[in-house]
Amino acid sequence: MQIHVTGRHMEITDAIRDYVHEKIQHELVEFPRTESVHMILNVEKYRQIAEVVVQAPNHVRVEAREESDDLYASIDASVEKMVKQMKRKRDTVQNHKSRESIAQVELEVQAATKETEII
């Protein structure tokens, strides 16, 4: 997984970059197929804005944006939003392969046991 950190109107320090990398890697452990993450940090007067864009296979793209007075709080909130969206996307994916229902399997087992009892 590639993690890019971009700063608009600010200098990205090593502490901020390390914090973003640790936070994203920790939160995306349950999504191993994530291709890339782009964190955009922006400062406008007193507003600290954090945006996250996540690319995953099968054309899955998740974006989250949060702003607050503290940059680290903005990063935390945007990553939490992104994780919620990723979980929602993952839960909507369905397996369209046909499966036998449990009731059908139980009926087959009962039929097999009846045949063995008769013989």
Image: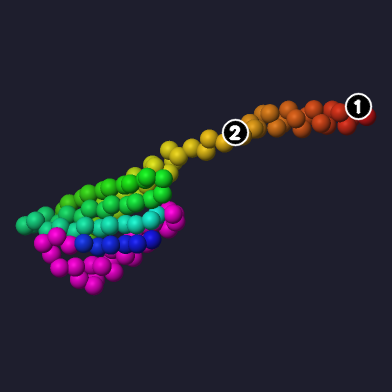
Q: Is residue 34 toward the left or the right of residue 74 in the image?
A: right
Image x and y of residue 18, in percent: 29, 69
Q: Earlier in the sequence, mark 1 or mark 2?
A: 2
Where 91 sits versus 16, above or below? Answer: above
Kind of residue at badge 2: Ser
Kind of residue at badge 1: Ile
Foreground mark, 1 or 2, reads: 2
Q: Is residue 71 toward the left or the right of residue 53 in the image?
A: left
**Is residue 63 visible in this depiction of the protein?**
yes
**Is residue 70 visible in this depiction of the protein?**
no
For the residues labelled 1 and 2, the Cα–Cα distance comes to 33 Å
Where 85 sits versus 23, above or below? Answer: above
- Where residue 118 is drawn, which disc sits there? 1
- Residue that label 2 marks: 98
Q: In the rendered structure, which segment of residues is drawn in magenta? A: 7-33
Image x and y of residue 39, in percent: 25, 58
Quarter of the picture holding the N terminus? bottom left
Where 92 sits versus 22, above or below? Answer: above
Image x and y of residue 93, in percent: 45, 39
Q: Decide: few, some or many residues near mark 2? Use Cα within 10 Å; few <14, some 14-19, many ≥20.
A: few
Residue at the location (49% across, 37% down)? 94
